[in-house]
Image (tube, rainbow, N blue to C red):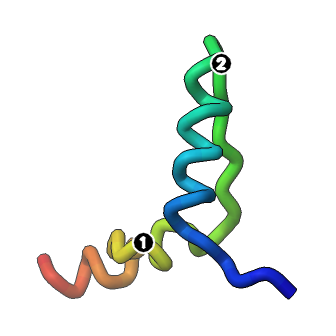
Amino acid sequence: MDKFNLIREIRELKNQLSYSKNMGFFLGAGSSCALGIPDIKNIFEVI
Protein backbone atom coordinates (compact mmCIF):
# COMPACT_ATOMS: atom_id res chain seq x y z
CA MET A 1 0.00 0.00 0.00
CA ASP A 2 1.33 3.45 -0.91
CA LYS A 3 1.82 6.07 1.77
CA PHE A 4 -0.29 9.21 1.60
CA ASN A 5 1.85 12.02 0.19
CA LEU A 6 0.24 15.36 1.04
CA ILE A 7 2.56 17.41 -1.17
CA ARG A 8 1.84 15.21 -4.18
CA GLU A 9 -1.92 15.42 -3.56
CA ILE A 10 -1.84 19.22 -3.25
CA ARG A 11 0.13 19.52 -6.48
CA GLU A 12 -2.32 17.24 -8.27
CA LEU A 13 -5.30 19.24 -6.96
CA LYS A 14 -3.62 22.50 -8.02
CA ASN A 15 -2.97 21.05 -11.47
CA GLN A 16 -6.57 19.91 -11.91
CA LEU A 17 -8.04 23.20 -10.65
CA SER A 18 -5.85 25.25 -12.99
CA TYR A 19 -7.90 23.93 -15.94
CA SER A 20 -11.27 24.40 -14.29
CA LYS A 21 -13.46 27.46 -14.83
CA ASN A 22 -16.30 26.45 -12.50
CA MET A 23 -16.10 24.38 -9.36
CA GLY A 24 -18.21 23.47 -6.40
CA PHE A 25 -17.66 21.81 -3.06
CA PHE A 26 -20.07 19.52 -1.29
CA LEU A 27 -19.36 19.29 2.42
CA GLY A 28 -21.20 17.05 4.81
CA ALA A 29 -22.61 17.74 8.23
CA GLY A 30 -19.90 18.38 10.79
CA SER A 31 -17.36 19.68 8.29
CA SER A 32 -17.26 23.11 9.89
CA CYS A 33 -16.72 21.63 13.36
CA ALA A 34 -13.89 19.48 12.01
CA LEU A 35 -12.26 22.67 10.71
CA GLY A 36 -12.58 24.37 14.10
CA ILE A 37 -15.50 26.65 13.24
CA PRO A 38 -17.81 26.74 16.29
CA ASP A 39 -21.28 25.27 15.99
CA ILE A 40 -24.46 27.07 17.05
CA LYS A 41 -24.32 25.64 20.58
CA ASN A 42 -20.80 26.96 21.18
CA ILE A 43 -21.61 30.36 19.67
CA PHE A 44 -24.38 30.95 22.21
CA GLU A 45 -22.17 29.79 25.11
CA VAL A 46 -19.70 32.56 24.23
CA ILE A 47 -22.36 35.31 24.14
Sequence-earlier tag: 1 or 2: 2
Q: Quick one: 2 or 35, which is closer to the camera?
A: 2
Q: Is residue 2 above or below residue 7?
A: below
In the structure shown, which secondary structural element does the residue marked by tag 1 occupy? loop
Please tell me the numbered disc located at residue 8: none
Q: Quick one: 23 or 32, which is closer to the camera?
A: 23
Mark 2 = which residue? 20
x then y, percent, for residue 20: 65, 18
Residue 47 lies in quadrant:
bottom left
Q: Nearer the viewer, mark 1 or mark 2?
A: 2
x then y, percent, for residue 3: 71, 83
The residue at 65%/42% (across/down) is 25
x then y, percent, for residue 31: 56, 68
Kindly identify the amino acid type of the residue bearing the numbered disc 1.
Leu
Mark 1 = which residue? 35
Kindly identify the amino acid type of the residue bearing the numbered disc 2.
Ser
Q: Is residue 31 above or below residue 12?
A: below
Q: Quick one: 27 or 3, which is closer to the camera?
A: 3
Compared across the picture, whether 47 is left or right of 14 comes to left
